[in-house]
Amino acid sequence: MTRLVFLGPPGAGKGTQARLLAAELHVPQIATGDMLREAVAAQTALGLEARRYMDAGALVPDDVVVGLIAERLAQPDARRGFILDGFPRTLAQAEGLERLLKDLGQGLDRVIFFSVSEPELLRRLTGRRVCPTCGSTFHLAFAPPKAGDRCDRCGSALVQRKDDREETVRARLAVYATQTVPLLDYYRDRHLLSTVSGEGDVAAVGRAIRNLVGRPA
Ligand code: AP5
Ligand code: MG
Ligand code: ZN
């Protein structure tokens, strides 16, 4: 199974797990949030448009993200498979993805939903620190960097994502509840949905996912 969607609320651990499993499966981790943050940093036209939505904790318009994914899935490295991390997150995006994959003669193997309680999500997001250079993710309490405020992998100074401030986190959780939760039924109806508890530690969640995709650790 190599065509996967990681679905779940902000802070559920999608990025943490997608990064590990993608490396193991030799498929790309395709994270719309990361792609949009790169566009913001590069100050492209797309980045300038996306930024307004991201800073407010709102979703970037569907046509913009579906366009990004269409380009990305057409790249040769996505032919063998992929992990979509944070896409789709509206019904319109799910329908867009279904059309794109149909045109490519592909289909999804599984959609993995990360179930995590709201208090835990708040703890994870407010304590998250990220490396602006290599993209590694840390947590002040749960995955602390060895050298204080520097990245273990590349030594860069870690930063807090702008949208990880508490008031923006609350907006993101509300957007998730109204716009993304309907995807659970959408994929359940298509017999693609599996749920994992995202509440255990990183290794335990990883084991649950590997069991589902047929790669028990
Ligand atoms: P995006 O970057 O996708 O953010 P998100 O979905 O809100 O999810 P996060 O990245 O915050 O959480 P995660 O599940 O990846 O958790 P992580 O592994 O980092 O999107 C950002 C914005 O971009 C959106 O608000 C929107 O504006 C725009 N956007 C993106 N995609 C879009 C789309 N498709 N359509 C429209 N707009 C879009 O973990 C979180 C923390 O917890 C970390 O500190 C980590 O170290 C820690 N942690 C992870 N696992 C565990 C564990 N098991 N135990 C303890 N701590 C853990
Ligand atoms: Mg993420
Ligand atoms: Zn780094």
Image (cartoon, rainbow, N blue to C red):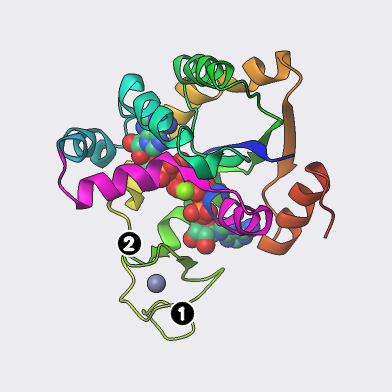
Q: Amino acid at mark 1?
A: Asp
Q: Nearer the viewer, residue 112 or 117?
A: 112
Label 2 CA crowd tier, 10 Å (few <14, some 14–19, many 20+): some
The residue most toward the front is 76
Provide the residue designation for mark 1.
152
- Mark identifier at residue 160: 2
What distance separates the C-alpha of mark 2 from that of mark 1? 16 Å
Q: Is residue 215 left or right of residue 98?
A: right
**Residue 174 in sight here:** no
User: Which quadrant, please, contains the N terminus?
Assistant: top right
Q: Does 20 appear in magenta?
A: yes
Residue name at image x 30 percent, y 25 percent: 64
Up-down relation of residue 83 to residue 42 (above or below): above
Q: Nearer the viewer, residue 74 or 208?
A: 74
- Residue 16: x and y, percent? 56, 56
Measured as percent of width and height from the top left, residue 48 is found at: 15, 38
Q: Is mark 1 within 8 Å of ligand 3?
A: yes
The residue stretch that appears in magenta: 16-44
